[in-house]
Amino acid sequence: MKLYSTKNIDHIVDLEEAVINSLAPEGGLYMPCELQPLPESFWSDFYNRSFQENSYLVCSHLFDGYIPENILKDIVYEAINFPAPLVRMSDTNIYSLELWHGPSLAFKDFGARFMSRLMSYFNRNNDSDLTILVATSGDTGGAVAAGFYDTPGIEVIILYPSGKVSALQEKQLTALGKNITALEIDGTFDDCQALVKQAFLDKSLNKQYRLSSANSINIARLIPQSFYYFEAIKQLGPTKEPITISVPSGNFGNLTAGLIAKRLGLKIDQFIAATNINNIVPKYLETGIYEPKPSISTISNAMDVGRPSNFDRMMALYRSTWNDIKQDISGAFYNDDQNKTIVKAIHNSHQYVADPHGALGYQSLIDVNSDGNNIFFETAHPAKFLDVMDEVLGSGNTPVPKRLALLKDKEKVSISLDTSYNSFCEWLKERKT
């Protein structure tokens, strides 16, 4: 498998280099050089296969023999070992794809578990540790911590914005210990993401550390996120009606994974990019003007991104052509007051508890499109945002899984830093002395 940089199409690497290095030398993101449609043999038995089997076949097609098939099958089957059920909203044409049935109760478990196993394979013959740097606006950190916890030869450093993740999300980042270290940054997610990107481009730092990233800047996160698009369409069953998928979006890795699935031949007629008031991409889809801005804190914190990294990948897929991209993707955005109203309306109408991210996906389907079959992604368990859910639905109406409840009394362990790169870099270098 060969991949190119979004900032230099002539810079081409193999899969291992793209995964381990995460970013290209000039700061570009890696994309597959080819996205050939899946063969007819894949589709002939598509609806009868398991989630794991379809995922393995998609991955095998993309990797094109780069990893031995028996090893690749183990990686996929171990990573994708929990379901993603499609749930119908009462007697409607709207469905929720629940992506929170993994260890950290968020959709990012799919990418984190796959990536941890793939990186372990690539790191198998190396004597020096691999250091994973990851910025999180909420769920990425918990998924990466769970996915890489106690993995030999790999340490994880998670940067998160102080006071801008929920209490239970914070415990998922800070209470594990062992090879997981949490840095509490006095800033926004965009500040955390900027620190990670700058570290990858710092030649001096890279002489001391073998660095990689578990953010969606890493192509190894996006590939497994495409798997559950196939699972959604499989569960929906054969249909001639149009299919629209609404994706709650922050850094836009999740939606980019869907665009990859579509290029592989999956029947998806329309995407909706649903965001909170950090509406950079919906505004672009409306006007053709891309204007990144400082992120704003909201109750749907995983989408609080003002400079989405994967916009570059979206542009690469569509060759920066606004007229083409807006044919496939529509945009919608909502403020916090609207979000709370939507969460309550879903509960009243369908007796369904949607989290503050999935709720925006649901509403965008109603506002943008109502024909055919409509799917929104429930990206995290609503109990991860318990303060908001209790405020909107009343205490006791949001069930709390036992594994989340147990986090409440665990000790938070984090290191506080400001947003300057010098502080971050000095902290990293001091660890090596």
Image (cartoon, rainbow, N blue to C red):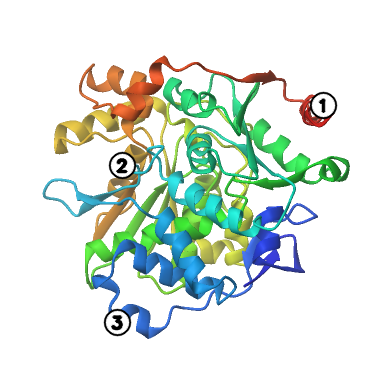
The label on residue 430 is 1
Q: Is residue 242 left or right of residue 139?
A: left
Q: Amino acid at mark 1?
A: Glu
Q: Tell whether label 3 touches label 2 (CB within 8 Å).
A: no
Q: Is residue 359 above or below residue 173?
A: below
Nearest to the eye among marks 1 and 3: give it. 1
Mark 2: secondary structure = helix
Q: Quadrant of residue 413?
A: top right
- Label 2 belongs to which residue? 363
Judge from the rendering whether residue 153 lies leftward or rightward of residue 69; answer left or right: right
The residue that mark 3 highlights is 44
Q: Amino acid at mark 2?
A: Gln
Note whether 205 is above or below 21 in the view shown: above
Q: Residue 345 placed where, x, y %?
A: 22, 32
Q: Residues within 10 Å of mark 2 (few under 14, many from 20)?
A: many
Mark 1 or 3 closer to N-term? 3
Which residue does the image show at 57% across and 70% down from the upper left?
A: 67
Residue in the picture at 33% in, 78% down: 43
In the picture, measured across the screen, residue 226 lies left or right of residue 124, that is left
Give residue 294's quadrant in the image: top right
- In the rendering, at what x and y percent does residue 398 appear? 24, 26
